[in-house]
Image (cartoon, grey):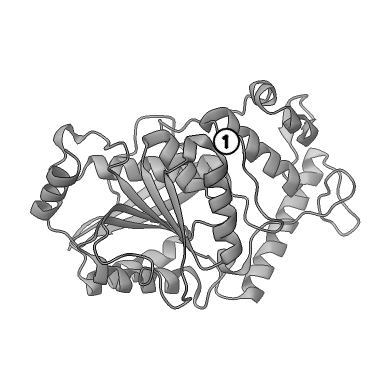
Amino acid sequence: MKHDRKHRPKPPGEAGSLHPRNLHRGRYDFDALMKTSPALATALRKNPHGDLSVDFADPESVKLLNQALLRHFYQVDSWDIPPGYLCPPIPGRSDYLHYAADLLAETPGNPGNTIPRGRRIRVLDVGMGANCIYPIVGSRLYGWQFVGTDIDPVAVRSAKTIADSNPVLKGRIECRLQPSEQNIFRGVIGDREAFDLMLCNPPFHASLAEATAGTRQKVRNLAASAKKKGTRVSSEGKPQAAGGLSLNFGGQGAELWCPGGEAAFIGRMIAESAEFGEQCLWFSSLVSRSDNLPGIYRHLKKAGARDVRTMEMHQGQKITRAVAWTFLAPEQQADWCQTRWQ
């Protein structure tokens, strides 16, 4: 098993910064965003330095920011999620897609190491959620064709509504319900289907209790930060939005936890991916905890992965990573590129 832990040198750019192609590098241009989405003004306030800032303690304000970003940068005018569902940060989600695009570019046999673009590139998003962020950003930036899967019917309906409501996404995103909580690829990948790339942001926590404790810790951390910055805080110590609404980190059960947590989910994914090794060029998954990596590498070796890449992504002080693997030998990868991408 070829194993490149660091993938490749970090793309040129500032240390700790987002990928050089990420449209969200630097500070938000709130004036430009408000011109595109006037409703965003209700979510902004001035910080102690006199600069405009989003009230990140208010989930509705975060949703308004996402709507503005999607409209301004991706021409997606209709985007919403059901109450309580995950509202992800778009800059970080975009980074995963850019590093995955670099991975495709480096595939043996790809002429010129250029990023393959257009509808001929098919991507599978496992657990797309109600927000449909990966298919939106990937189809808009690279023209890729997406299939998104989820075990939650509400999430699938929400993602399908987004895909169908925006002309720029029409015909580019297919949403499928995974009928079995025990399966990841079985039941949603057809016998003759092929995908160039698979993406996944797996559930992090191992139980509902752990997810609840993690959310409480986030609330405490954000409350402490809010006090330092002069943000209004509720009597329970929770940052408040306008109208006194307490902070609510979005996310349904399947988005936040599963038995065994991230490590167990990725282990199951790796084992099942071996059954579809000739139908997908690159499998990949985000990995939140670095101490899960040794176990993941053991799973990949056991499953027979031929090549493994670990991609580090820097978002300020935060470091995230994605692990990618393939069951195809270099000559098979080259044949894939020549037959599908030319």
Q: In the rendered view, tell whether residue 169 sits above or below residue 335.
A: above
Label 1: state its secondary structure.
Answer: helix
Q: In the rendered view, tell whether residue 121 sits above or below residue 288.
A: above
Dot 1 alpha-carbon crowd within 10 angstroms: few under 14, some 14 to 19, many 20 or more: many
| 334 or 215: nearer the viewer | 334
Indicate left or right for 65 with 302 as reference: right
Position of the N terminus, as image quadrant, is bottom left
Q: In the rendered view, tell whether residue 185 sits above or below residue 61.
A: below
Percent across and percent down for residue 68 are 64, 33
Q: Is residue 218 visible?
A: yes
Percent across and percent down for residue 252 are 63, 65
Percent across and percent down for residue 196 are 27, 51
Q: Which amino acid, by three-letter code, is at mark 1?
A: Leu
Indicate left or right for 266 with 78 as reference: left
| 198 or 213: nearer the viewer | 198
Image quarter for residue 227? top right
| 92 or 173: nearer the viewer | 173
Position of the C terminus, as image quadrant, is top left
Q: Is residue 26 visible?
A: no
Query: Residue at coordinates 24% horizontally, 39% vertically from top-left?
Result: 105
Percent across and percent down for residue 107 are 20, 45
Query: Residue at coordinates 33% horizontally, 64% vertically from top-left?
Result: 189
Mark 1 lies on residue: 70
Query: Residue at coordinates 38% horizontally, 74% vertically from top-left?
Result: 268
Query: Residue at coordinates 78% horizontally, 45% vertically from top-left?
Result: 226
Indicate left or right for 261 with 97 as reference: right
Please, which residue is most extreme toward the left here?
Answer: 331
